[in-house]
Amino acid sequence: MSKKWRLTDRTRTLLLMELAITLPALALMGFSIWNLKHIQRDKQIEAAIQRDLQYVLKGVEHKAWDKSVALITPLQKEFPSADDPEKAKAKLGELLTAHPEFAYAMLYDKKTNRFISREQPGRENDPTFCALADETISSTAKWLPLESGSLFESLRMMEKKDDPGLGFMSDWSNMGGARTYTSLAYFIPSNTPHDRVTIGMLAFDPDFLKSHFFPQIIKDSLANKNGTMSNPPAVILRSPHDYTPWVASDNWDGGKPEVDRTFLDAFRGLTASIKYPGKTVADMSNNFLHYNYTVLGALSLFMIGGILLTYRNISREMNLARLKSDFVANVSHELRTPLALIRLYAETLELGRLNSKEKYQEYFRIIREESERLTALINNILDFSRIEAGRKEYEFKETNLAELVRTTLESYRFQIEQHGFAFEENISNDVPPVIVDREAIARSLLNLVNNALKYSRDKKYIGVNLYRSNGSVNLEVCDHGIGISPDEQEKIFEKFYRCGDPLVHNIKGSGLGLSLVRHIARAHGGDVKVESAPEKGSKFIIALPLDPSARTGAAMA
Ligand code: ADP
């Protein structure tokens, strides 16, 4: 009956735990794993990283545009008119001297068909520079008169749209044997009258672009990345056709870039490329996944541990609840049986109908034994409730243990022998006086002897030994009874615990005796041990230390 109750209750708790904790937790874990797998399949992390890199390149292009507009617009305002060629040439020279970032300037007026050009005065002694400038100026002088009308129209359109009225022509060329990139801006000079078609042009110095303009822009674009990342990305600018960097950030380490962006507008013909030095994005996304799997694994282990722990605790609590309810049933039975016997025998005696003196003696003995059992049981229960409430106190006194054991057993000897037990008492002579609570030790001994009586079948033997062993005095109670299986040997000292052996369930008991014995032994600074094998008998050993400092007086049961 009680087994069935336990089973259903356990199953219910288990189901509840599964529903309330395990299922959501498992679902969460499953979802995370699915999510990670999904991310892996879709290469979402790689895409996210690439988007981030693309964003950096977009920043580089925007900054390059803004900065070039900022450099050119002030000069657009100061550009001379072509009406006086000498004056215009001088003015262009002045502007170039003040702005060494430009290589040369050109001015074309359609009405007068005048083409005026001026090279950077500071670079007049640089033949490579001059050769490149000469070449562009002479070719521009040829095509600009033909194209000036349409260029002018498109610039006016831009201005109407509130855009900076700026157009750009850019190209790769050879300068001193190296490929170099330059960009030429064209615009309508600010002071151009409405009825005139005039085009101004300014070419960036390729060295300025390569050594100052772009390195600074790349630096600015990576600035916020440098602060927050241990491995900030590296950027290069190159021609679209090969990966040789024209401009590179300091941390560029070669190899294939992750993301490219080909510039439009101001710096057409330039490609910006970006990557993380050392690592590929695929490596990084793998690292991310590994890290997440590891964290998920560790969390799962913690969770499983937590569930097991909760399950164990619940089981333990349920066991205790079951033991308690068994205890109440056992104790009520144990109280009722001796009382019924005492009443029965007392009534018989009262009638005075017994015919022999022996019968009277036997009835008196039974009444005494039963009342002793009752007293022992009630003492156990009282002690137990005091211990549970933390109110158990011991009265430690120097005691001659040999004498205590002898007198305690004396009143029991007759009963033991009456039950057909062979009784052996071995008290060694060298047992020194020990400081103990007399009553508690006597009760422990009686509990052990009582158990030996209860849990023996045919081999009826009880041995009690008292001897000195190193720093303690050992009190042993041996029997040749039913024994205790190894897995129950620790549990029998727990409160309410009774062995699963069917014989034990036919013998009355409360499951409190041994827990009291252990509490008492520990309160004396010692302990109780059992050596036993099923059907081979048991030996309980209470070790009491001679050193009184080991006592606690109120050790936990
Ligand atoms: P009980 O009132 O059940 O005897 P105890 O705490 O004294 O309670 O003992 C706990 C259990 O340990 C007993 O129910 C019994 O199964 C087992 N036990 C105790 N002493 C012996 C023994 N000498 N031989 C076999 N089993 C024993």
Image: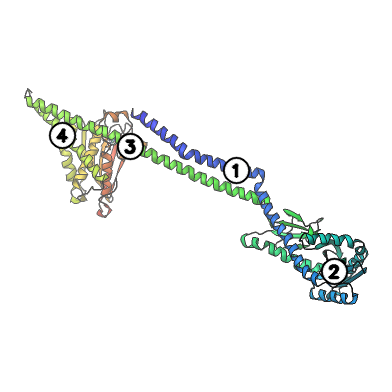
Q: Position of residue 58 (x, y in %)?
A: 72, 57
**Dots 4 and 2: beta carbons under 8 Å?**
no
Indicate yes or no: mark 1 CB to ligand 1 under 8 Å: no
Q: Earlier in the sequence, mark 4 or mark 3?
A: 3
Q: Nearer the viewer, residue 326 or 79?
A: 79
Residue at the disc numbered 3: 321
Residue at the disc numbered 2: 193
Q: Is residue 538 visible?
A: yes
Instruction: Please state which amino acid type lies under the numbered disc 3.
Output: Ala
Q: Quadrant of residue 455?
A: top left
Label 1 or label 3, whichever lies nearer to me, is 1
Q: For mark 2, does the 10 Å Cα neighbourhood hold few (<14), some (14 to 19), or many (20 or more) residues?
A: few
- Disc 1 to disc 4, how far (Cα)? 73 Å
Label 4 or label 2, whichever lies nearer to me, is 2
Q: Position of residue 14 (x, y in %)?
A: 43, 35
Label 3 or label 2, whichever lies nearer to me, is 2
Label 4 or label 3, whichever lies nearer to me, is 3
Q: Position of residue 136 (x, y in %)?
A: 89, 66
- Disc 3 to disc 2, how far (Cα)? 104 Å
**Quick one: SS at disc 3?**
helix
Q: Earlier in the sequence, mark 1 or mark 4?
A: 1
> In the rendered view, how is the structure colored?
rainbow
Residue at the disc numbered 1: 35
